[in-house]
Image (cartoon, rainbow, N blue to C red):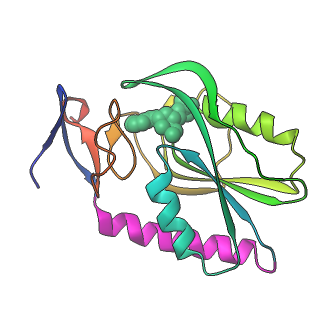
Amino acid sequence: MEPVHIRDKHFKLFIGRDEIQQRISHMAQQIEQDYSGKQPIFLCLLKGSFIFAADLFRAVNMPAEVSFVRLNSYDGTNSTGEVNTLLAINDILQDRHVILVEDIIDTGKTVHELMKELEYLQPASVKLASLLSKPDALQHDVTIDYTGFVIPDKFVVGYGMDYNELGRNLPDIYVLADQED
Ligand code: IMP
Ligand code: MG
């Protein structure tokens, strides 16, 4: 597979589409078991999780709803440490079973802040599904209930994830080439 160039950087293939789909099927099965008899609402964090969320949501064979929230904490390849709400939640989440859907947990700041906000909306439960987890970068108290892949602290793009807004439409996940040893 050829390396891809995005702006000033080179990326190489890291996790292929088939491996991603296999993992998502497995995550969906776990969710079906855990939420049997319930009707969860998938709350997707835009923009990065939109492709993962679309695949996970379709893989879950049960009555379920979907909604979206948009926060922003990333600038280029670094977390800024500040989280802003760009699209607020306007669904009634009181007494609902919420499954937060994230592309990647890096420092954990975004999800940590969102969890605090969600408490005010009094959901029945909140769980977190994240396609990727970078435990070496984690700085906040975040528990991932459904993890796709645990990866090293390296910058990735594709399958929804971007480098300064480009690369989201790559069907596979790529890693920054000069970070790979
Ligand atoms: P956190 O708040 O530091 O956990 O950052 C989480 C958000 O930063 C994720 O939802 C992603 O949108 C973005 N992010 C973190 N790591 C990467 C990466 O390696 N590539 C692209 N985006 C990333
Ligand atoms: Mg994101």
Q: Residue at x 63, y 72 (%)?
A: 30
Where is the C terminus found, in terms of image quarters? top left
Magenta region includes residue 23: yes
Picture layout, residue 72 above or below residue 25: above
Percent coordinates x, y for residue 121 in the rendering:
87, 44
Left or right: 111 in relation to 153: right
Percent coordinates x, y for residue 107 in the rendering:
55, 29
Q: Residue at x 40, y 69 (%)?
A: 21
Left or right: 118 in relation to 138: right
Along the line of sight, which residue is nearer the eye, 93 or 27? 93
Picture layout, residue 133 above or below residue 66: above
Q: How many marks overall?
A: 0
Percent coordinates x, y for residue 142 in the rendering:
68, 39
Along the line of sight, which residue is nearer the eye, 12 or 73? 73
Left or right: 81 in relation to 91: left
- The magenta segment is 16-37
Magenta region includes residue 102: no
Q: Is residue 162 visible?
A: yes
Residue farthest along the left direction in this orientation: 2
Percent coordinates x, y for residue 79 in the rendering:
48, 23
Q: Is residue 106 visible?
A: no
Left or right: 113 in relation to 44: right
Q: Residue at x 72, y 62 (%)?
A: 41
